Amino acid sequence: MDDFNNNFNSQQPQQQPQYQQPQYQQPQYQQPQYQQSQFQQNPYGQQNAYTQQGRLPSKSKEKIVAGLLGIFLGGLGIHKFYLGYTKAAVIMLLVSLLTFGFGAGIMGIIGLVEGIIYLTKTDVDFDNIYVLGEKQWF
């Protein structure tokens, strides 16, 4: 019995394991990394002129104003002046004035067609073709 008592007394009471709360970490969210090539092409596969030149696209306000000027004052070439096409604007203005109004009808039709084309283009297409591409006629 002594052995039993000795073994019993010699054993240390077992300690209960301490409960530790788990350490939660905040999830680290990262911004998605986009490749530059995704922004260099529009949905139609054409390369955007403003990404080549490091410029941002213009606002749709410019497209709307140019379209309305083309529809209402297209015979005088005012929409061309607005877009910065001075040579084409002077040609339209001189044809309208020097023909004493007879050429104004033709220039008015050209302005009407160009105004409608401006308004039907998307902002990106308008910027690529008329603002950055500097296409002066149609």
Image (cartoon, helix red, strand yellow):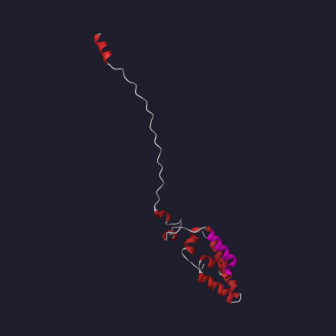
Out of 112 and 88, give the one closest to the viewer.
88
- For the image shown, how many numbered marks are present on the structure? 0
Name the residue at the top extreme: 1
Predominant SS along the magenta part: helix
The vertical placement of 44 against 70, above or below, is: above
Name the residue at the left extreme: 3
Residue 29 colored magenta? no
Quarter of the figure that contains the C terminus: bottom right
Q: Horizontal placement of 111 versus 129: left or right? A: right
- Residue 137: % across, % down: 59, 80
Q: Residue at x 44, y 38 (%)?
A: 23
Quarter of the figure that contains the N terminus: top left
Q: Residue at x 62, y 76 (%)?
A: 82
**Highlighted range, magenta:** 61-75
- Residue 80: % across, % down: 62, 79
Out of 39 and 17, give the one closest to the viewer.
17
Q: Residue at x 48, y 70 (%)?
A: 52
Out of 85 and 135, give the one closest to the viewer.
85
Would you say residue 120 is visible in this rendering?
A: no
Q: Horizontal placement of 48 versus 81: left or right? A: left
The vertical placement of 110 against 3, above or below, is: below
Hey, which quadrant is residue 100 in on the image?
Answer: bottom right
Q: Horizontal placement of 31 versus 119: left or right? A: left
